[in-house]
Amino acid sequence: MIKDRRSLRKDTRAFTGLEAAIVLTAFIVVAAVFSYMVLGAGFFSTEKAKAVVHSGVEQATSSAELVGEVVGRDTDSNSLLDYINFTVQLTAGQNPMDLDEASIAFTNATTHNDSTVWTYTMFECLESPCDNMLEPSEKAEIQVSLPVELGTYNKFLLEFKPQSGGVLCMHKTTPGAIKTVTRLY
């Protein structure tokens, strides 16, 4: 019987197999944890990229569009424009726009004004009385007080800047004759 005990002590084949199984299991667990972390980081970066693209598209697309003509008004009959009137509405699929948060910039050859004074009148409102939110199917007529009076053949730029979304730019030129109401080209 003593011989049998010695043969058991010298046989280490079982320990080698057990050690290999433990090492293999450890590699599998580490690989699974690593792959989970890589996939999680990939999903996170994909969601961030999606949000950035969505935000970029929202900022790049114009949220307001011009409806009808841009006209100039000469209120004191001196053949110089004092006000510009135009009408805006939301473009298709846009969210409501707070007109109180928008601004209008005026630029011509001699003047640039980022905070031009302007007022708006809502019409075709969904609720009564109208509020300051421009919503789908509503329109707002905007009257801009010009920082300088414009005579004939003056080129200028009006920029309607909503709080979010693209800027609505209007490059216009006054015609050769100024009337009480003058259509601008």
Image: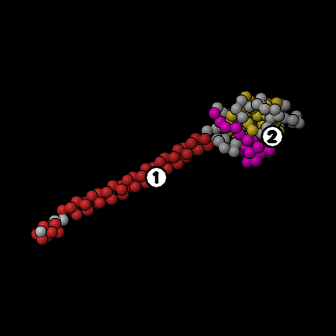
* Residue under the point 55% across and 46% down: 52
Point out residue 166 in the picture as x, y percentages from the top left corner.
64, 41
The amino acid beneath tag 1 is Ala
**Relative to 1, is 81 on the left or the right?**
right
* Residue under the point 69% across and 34% down: 90
Q: Is residue 152 among what the camera can see?
A: no
Asked if residue 105 lies in the magenta stretch, the reply is yes
Residue 34's quadrant in the figure? bottom left
Residue 28's quadrant in the figure? bottom left
Q: Which mark is residue 41?
A: 1
Point out residue 6 in the picture as x, y percentages from the top left corner.
14, 70
Residue to which mark 2 is pinned: 119
41 or 115, nearer to the observer: 41
User: Counting other residues with Cα less than 10 Å from the Cα at mark 1, is it few (<14), some (14-19), or many (20 or more)?
Assistant: few
In this rendering, is residue 111 above or below 139? below
Foreground mark, 1 or 2, reads: 1
Q: Magenta stretch?
A: 93-119
In this rendering, is residue 58 above or below 175? below
User: Counting other residues with Cα less than 10 Å from the Cα at mark 2, is it few (<14), some (14-19), or many (20 or more)?
Assistant: few
Q: Which mark is residue 77?
A: none
Asked if residue 184 lies in the magenta stretch, the reply is no
**Relative to 46, is 113 on the left or the right?**
right
* Residue under the point 36% across and 57% down: 30
126 or 70, nearer to the observer: 126
Point out residue 83 in the picture as x, y percentages from the top left corner.
81, 38
27 or 169, nearer to the observer: 27
Query: Between disc 1 and disc 2, whose residue precedes?
Result: 1
Secondary structure category for the residue under label 1: helix
